[in-house]
Amino acid sequence: MDITILIYQAILVVFIFSVSLFVAMYSTYAERKVAAFMQDRIGPDRAGPFGILQPLADGVKMFMKEEFIPNPSDKFLFVVGPCVAMFTACISSAVIPWGDSLSINGHILSLQVADINIGILYVFGVVSMGVYGIMIGGWASNNKYSMIGAIRASSQLISYEISMGLALIPIVMMSGSISLKTIVEQQQGIHWNVFVQPLSFLIFLICAFAETNRTPFDLPECETELIGGFHTEYSSMKLGFYLFAEYINMFVSSAVMAALYFGGYNFPFIHSLGLSHNAVTLLGVGFFFAKIFAFIFFFMWVRWTIPRFRYDQLMKLGWKILIPLAILNILITGALMMIKAS
Amino acid sequence: MATANPIDYLPIIIQFIVAIGFVIFGMIGSHLLGPKKHSKVKDDSFECGIEAQGNARLPFNVKYFLTAILFVLFDVEVIFMYPWAVNFRDNLGNGTWFWEMILFVVFLMLGFLYIIKKGALDWD
């Protein structure tokens, strides 16, 4: 690997990093606007036209607020918690293929930070590290609400991780690879996995809601019982990191779902338009982001529609319904593939 | 399938560095910018507006612990399925390939039924 490729990759990393921060920032704005729309309100409208500068104002406010570390807490771990949460959220986007490749001056530039062959396992690994951020933060706070929130969160995250892993196995069986790039390439045009594996998609979608702590699975931070859950004691940028990490996770899981089940950067009639390779790639990136935004909107729509689960219902859904369903799906897929082959 | 090459992981290291840089920048930046005023009452942990009673690190429900143990068990099983799934398409002609997984799943489900019968997943 020569130095120009390395520089290109560094630029790509910084660019994608900025895009994911930007999308996460404007997700907070979009969430409030969507909430306002659903509740027949106006929503933020003071900072700039239509309140478009609201996320910036929020960011500056978070930065300028007083940093507060309670006395009974474990001070080192109290700082480490939000750092881990933010760090894991930021690195999970590395394996997502944002587009095909661009060819500039004879160089083929891939629009994916790292095409590693363990692809989806990397995402799972990073996502499961996110539980440390919440657990460390909640435990270090030494506050009863934080502690209960953290235990609930860890228990919920690890429970849904199993069904998430199982839900994906039919996709892996069909594509014979766990590299995200290969899985996306196999969904040319409109041959999207969601049409072949709707059950797998449904299970994965439910698990994605649970893994990002979104309503109806926001028990770790349910304000009516636990004040703020694991981040009750946090203020300033540390609180900002926790909230921001949630929005980045939402963005990344939307991207993963769009890539795995909705064809990623593929769109119908991709090769009959007669456009150049670069134009098709850019159009594909546009389509990919449109799919991602559709998912983010869906996350918000659900949040303002469905009430929160009770804890025993949450555990029952995760263990007694989703896991058997996912295993059944694996067996059915295997049997159908065997019948088709013979 | 592409062969693994350690150099493929270099961009991930770059992303790690960028992410760590951002986190440290955010932490130090907000630490320097915000006001700092301390008092004894303010530095106490927030509970109900009255003085906090006792330590928060109390024993908690054993169900959470059981869930964690079961998670370790089941997650290992899930990881066992991945190598099988990746190679499944290339071994469709091989009849035993599928039945071996059925056997594995049957054993897994026997264990699953056992923990359900034992009530390890009941939260009432």
Image (cartoon, rainbow, N blue to C red):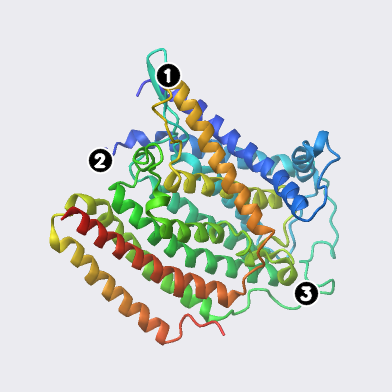
Q: Position of residue A113 (x, y in %)?
A: 45, 34
Task: Tell me which residue sits at (69%, 66%) in the image.
Answer: A222
User: In this picture, is A341 found above or below B117?
Assistant: above
Q: Nearer the viewer, mark 3 or mark 2?
A: 2
Q: Disc 2 residue type?
A: Met
Mark 1, residues whose alpha carbon is within 10 Å: few (<14), some, or many (≥20)? few
Q: Chain of mark 2?
A: B
- Count of residue discs: 3
Report whether residue A215 is seen: yes
Labels 2 and 1 in the same subunit? no
> Is A172 situated left or right of B17 in this image?
left
Residue B1 circle label: 2
Examine the image and state in which quarter residue B28 appears.
top right
Examine the image and state in which quarter residue B11 appears.
top left
Residue A276 circle label: 1
Q: Chain of mark 3?
A: B
Report whether residue A79 is seen: no
Q: Disc 3 residue type?
A: Ala
Q: Can you name the residue that lies furthest to the top here?
A: A105
Q: Position of residue B88 (x, y in %)?
A: 23, 54
- Mark 3 or mark 2: name the one nearer the start of the chain: 2
Q: Position of residue A174 (x, y in %)?
A: 30, 51
Q: Disc 1 residue type?
A: Ser
Task: Tell me which residue sits at (57%, 51%) in the image.
Answer: A84
Q: Nearer the viewer, mark 2 or mark 1?
A: 1
Disc 3 and disc 2: Cα gap in Å? 59 Å
User: In this picture, is A34 found above or below A51?
Assistant: below
Residue of label 3:
B52
User: In this picture, is A3 found above or below A114?
Assistant: above
Labels 3 and 2 in the same subunit? yes
